[in-house]
Image: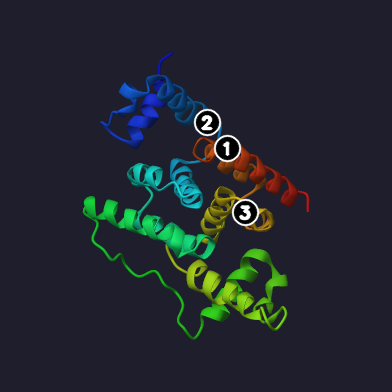
Amino acid sequence: MAISKAAQDYHEKMFPGYQSKFLETDPEFIERFDNFAFDEVVNQVQLDDRTTMMSHLAYLLGCQGIDEFRAMLPAALNFGVTPVEVKEIVYQAVAYLGIGRVFPFLHAVNDVLTQRGVALPLAPQSATTTENRLEAGEQAQIDIFGEGMRGFAQSGPDESRHINRWLADNCFGDYYTRKGLDYKQREMITFCFLAAQGGCEPQLTSHAAANMKIGNDKAFLIDIISVNVPFIGYPRSLNALRCVNEAAGR
């Protein structure tokens, strides 16, 4: 068996001039993996390269694949994902994964960007202030999920109402309102974070529905799941597919 020309060409686009050491140490494995991931899978889906790479980065954050993230980040940049977009993916991940899991990825991004001559910090992308983040966050929730989110920040039992407020002012007001990514891209990466980490099926179903509401249709989400099977494996991919089907049937 040999690595197909299509897989070789795709690998060359990702990593120009690079030859993996696995070709020497694990040739049978790398032939099967590259032919699957970089030929069979990418030619099954109808995604542009930038979206594919953005989803890979978000999935790798979600599953804590730091070494593969560090390896794939240059490929994402080579495929046109901008430094601002990369930073926005990592920043938004904090709301869904927590800083404890995102911290090493932020370091990895800074290392790779610095090595490529990108001056840090990047241009500011914040679009809210301390005074308006709650209002702006609630509006983002309404824009994405619908009118049922109006007043959500003030809802719920007294002892836990603050968490609903934080969802509005922190998760949405601090992150979703930022420039650099639009709502469709932000909902797509949120779907990836949730699908990759597992154990978040209620939230994943809700965000699958939100994706479809704002234009990331069922076929698009199935493509996002499909193109990331090599990076996340089958169990969580099948769970994500079930959540998409459930959301589509609502």
Report, in whole angstroms, how far the alpha carbon at label 3 lies from the one at label 2: 23 Å
Q: Nearer the viewer, mark 3 or mark 2?
A: 2
Q: Is residue 98 visible?
A: yes
Residue to which mark 3 is pinned:
215
Report, in whole angstroms, how far the alpha carbon at label 1 lies from the one at label 3: 18 Å
The amino acid on which the numbered mark 3 sits, given as a three-letter code, is: Gly
Q: Is residue 125 left or right of residue 19?
A: right
Image quadrant containing the C terminus: bottom right
The amino acid on which the numbered mark 1 sits, given as a three-letter code, is: Ser
Residue to which mark 1 is pinned:
226
Residue to which mark 2 is pinned:
41
Q: Earlier in the sequence, mark 1 or mark 3?
A: 3
Q: Badge 2 local density, few (<14 within 10 Å), some, or many (20+)?
A: some
The residue nearer to you, when weighing 30 against 100, is 100
Q: Badge 1 local density, few (<14 within 10 Å), some, or many (20+)?
A: many
How far across and down, in percent of the image, does residue 163 sit? 61, 75
User: What residue sits 51% from the left and 35% below the top?
Assistant: 230
Q: Is residue 194 left or right of residue 107?
A: right
**Residue 28 higher or lower than 146, as above or below:** above
Picture quadrant where residue 136 is located: bottom right
The amino acid on which the numbered mark 2 sits, given as a three-letter code, is: Val
User: What residue sits 32% from the left and 67% below the top?
Assistant: 123
How far across and down, in percent of the image, does residue 27 sit? 37, 20
Circle 3: element type:
loop
Circle 1: element type:
helix
Are discs 2 and 1 less than 8 Å apart at CB? Answer: yes
